[in-house]
Amino acid sequence: MPVLPPYSWPKPHLKGQRSAGFTLIEIVIVVAIIGTMVAFLGMSLSRDTDRMARLEAKRFHAVVNEVRDEAILAGQNYLLSVNDKLGRYSFSRMLADSGQAAIYEDGLLKPRTVQNGVSIKWQVFEQFENDEDAGSKDPVVLISSLGEITPFEASFIGDESAVTVYLDDKGQLAQTTKSSGVF
């Protein structure tokens, strides 16, 4: 009689052996674990947008201070404009005839876009004569060659907090953070 290889031997059927598949308890446990993981992920993402809003506000604060220093050193006036609908801000050089020329550099003065999940709310407290003539154009902030900046507020808003960069009473940039309030 020929000898059969081990993989072809008949398998004995054991009584009481469980059939293949999952029990209801196993399925409930897996769904509960997945639900918990999704909840933690949601909380983590919420904290991430708030963290990104803080980082964007810090970056904005630093860039505006650097442009102020550049204006003083170069003896040149700059304009800061913010498009809060697109989440962008950019700088332009103010020309002698009060016109402005856009700056598309790769360095300090390049146009910037805030990260996804962060929005900007922008308010300028004084308007230039050019702003009134422009009509629907976004208001701009003058960063003068004397180091003066037009008073403004720029709020960077995450899911649960907002960081506002503004010009204080001494003409210096400052920041405040508000949590879970109306922005």
Image (cartoon, rainbow, N blue to C red):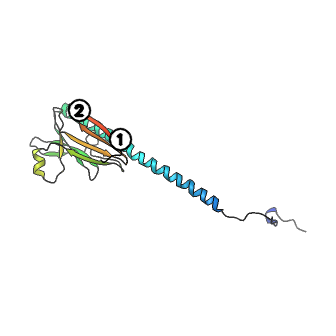
Q: Is residue 107 visible?
A: no
Q: Position of residue 39 (x, y in %)?
A: 49, 52
**Which quadrant is home to the N terminus?**
bottom right
Return the residue found at the far right: 1
Badge count: 2
Label pair 1/2, CB-CB below 8 angstroms: no
Return the residue found at the far front: 181
Return the residue found at the far bottom: 1
Residue 172 - label: 2
Mark 1, secondary structure of its residue:
helix
Q: Is residue 85 left or right of residue 125?
A: right
Q: Position of residue 55 (x, y in %)?
A: 35, 40
Q: Is residue 68 left or right of residue 178?
A: left
Q: Nearer the viewer, residue 46 or 117?
A: 46
Q: How far apart, in angstroms, are the residues tagged by discs 1 and 2?
A: 19 Å
Mark 2, secondary structure of its residue:
loop
Q: Is residue 163 left or right of residue 74?
A: right
Question: Which residue is rendered at x = 16% and y = 38% of the image?
Answer: 77
Q: Residues within 10 Å of mark 1 (few under 14, many from 20)?
A: many
Q: Is residue 140 left or right of residue 8?
A: left
Amino acid tagged 1: Arg
Question: Which residue is rendered at x = 64% and y = 59% of the image?
Answer: 25
Amino acid tagged 2: Gln
Question: Which residue is rendered at x = 57% and y = 58% of the image?
Answer: 31
Q: Residues within 10 Å of mark 2 (few under 14, many from 20)?
A: few
Q: Which tag, 1 or 2, sits closer to the chain's start?
A: 1
Q: Is residue 172 visible?
A: yes
Q: Which residue is mark 1?
A: 54
Residue 16 location, quadrant: bottom right
**Placement of 157 over or under 22, stated as above or below:** above
Q: Position of residue 182 (x, y in %)?
A: 31, 48
**Placement of 69 over or under 179, stated as above or below:** above
